[in-house]
Image (tube, rainbow, N blue to C red):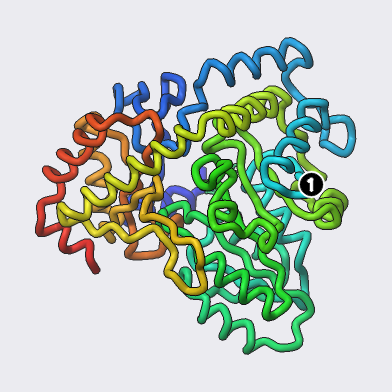
Amino acid sequence: MPSPFDWTHDELARLEREGLRRSLVTRTSPQLASRIASSRGTLLNFGSNDYLALAADERLREAARRAIDEVGVGSGASPLVTGFGRYHAVLAERLAQFEHAERALLLVSGYAANVAVVTALVGRGDLILSDARNHASIIDGCRLAGAEIAIYRHGDVEHARELLVSRPGVRRKLIITDSLFSMDGDIAPLESLADLAEEHGAMLVVDEAHATGVFGARGSGVVEALGLESRIAVRVGTLSKSLGSSGGFIVGPASVIDLLMSTARTFIFSTAGTEAAAAAALKALEIVEQEPALRASLLAMSQTFRAELRSRGFQVQCSAPATGSQKIPLPDASQIIPIVLGDPLRTMQVAQQLRERGIWVPGIRPPSVPQGQSLLRISLTSAHTSSDLDQLLSELLALLPAASRENSRS
Ligand SMILES: *Cc1c(COP(=O)(O)O)cnc(C)c1O
């Protein structure tokens, strides 16, 4: 008997042929930032965003357990109804302090935070300038907002300027970018974007999802590292990467956060996250503040490994932003290190071969990256050791002979 869902078989077959079909691997251990057990055996883990190795940290577990003992598990309602608890309130206050912002708003995920901020700030008759490599959650927020979307070439402030001046007469303008790009591992030219926004009276919003906890003297992100906190007041972050918990947040001036609270549908219509997650994130913030050596050693290790890969012929793009107006230079040190192989089938094949050798490096394909830009995404964490990195390097050298490293240039 035919089913109206029959077309899904054909569609899956097409994805399979093109190397785009995805499947789950079950992790059977806690998220240990350097090694995990999985349904495919024990793997050296270069596929986690748990950059400070906090997701399974005993101190976060204890904080979450205490919160559960005190208030239970589910929050039971959306935040504006009865879902907003004391741990949420304390966390929002601490995040605002940590980010040197007036106010913070908690959401169930970073994805929900990006959709919230874009849809609340712009609508029909407005213009969004969005970096070509922005995270999918920003792209989806832009689509939902109903504003005109102008996509500027990755990191290209002059292109953003051209697009902006070619559209006079729009009501509001929003420039939005990742600070540390999630797949490319490079940093946006934030100071030049801040200049552009100020010249044109545009709002600027920066997503620090991968930078929170890793960059900046206090560990709040790239905006802090570049001394731009007062010029880039509205920022998005997540509790689910370096902070080892789950949930998203937005910080900004009181008027912006208050408006979001009253209008952002992903805030209003979703049950509040658990207080246990908020309690764990609070503990993680304390660790980030008290242990700056965690991020310093991660960035030092990343800088060394980037240089090592490059010296062996791998094409690893520099992570620091092009100079432009930037006053504070950043080292080429981001912990996200992409090796671009181009073809999705080949990329997944190399990822599979690494897995057979006990190493988990995710292969990233469209739509996470543009066509022809499939890549191995290596992410380092503060729990990796130099012998972990040696093992990864020697397997990469074995699997990708010099000639194929050359190919990745294109
Ligand atoms: C992961 C990510 C998000 C989404 O955060 P979640 O908390 O995982 O939903 C948003 N923006 C960027 C740049 C990300 O990499």
Q: Residue at x 65, y 13 (%)?
A: 65
| 376 horizontally vs 284: left or right | left
Q: Residue at x 66, y 54 (%)?
A: 235
Q: Which residue of the protein is positioned furthest toward the front in this rendering?
A: 327
Image location (x, y in percent) of residue 404: 14, 57
Q: Residue at x 60, y 76 (%)?
A: 150
State whether label 1 is within 8 Å of ligand 1: no
Q: Which residue of the protein is positioned furthest toward the top in this rendering?
A: 69
Number of labelled discs?
Answer: 1
- SS at mark 1 in the image: strand
Residue 63 makes an appearance in the image: yes
Mark 1 Cα shell of 10 Å, populated few (<14), some (14-19), many (≥20): many
Rendered-image quadrant of the C terminus: bottom left
Residue 13 makes an appearance in the image: no
Image height of 251 relative to 98, above or below: below
Tell which of 264 and 226 is nearer to you.
Answer: 226
Tell which of 171 and 74 is nearer to you.
Answer: 171
The residue wearing badge 1 is 103
Image height of 141 relative to 4, above or below: below
Image location (x, y in percent) of residue 286: 62, 28
| 214 horizontally vs 145: left or right | left
Q: Quadrant of residue 18?
A: bottom left
Instruction: Say what amino acid the circle numbered 1 marks.
Output: Arg
Image location (x, y in percent) of residue 156: 48, 74
Q: Residue at x 15, y 39 (%)?
A: 394
Image location (x, y in percent) of residue 131: 53, 68
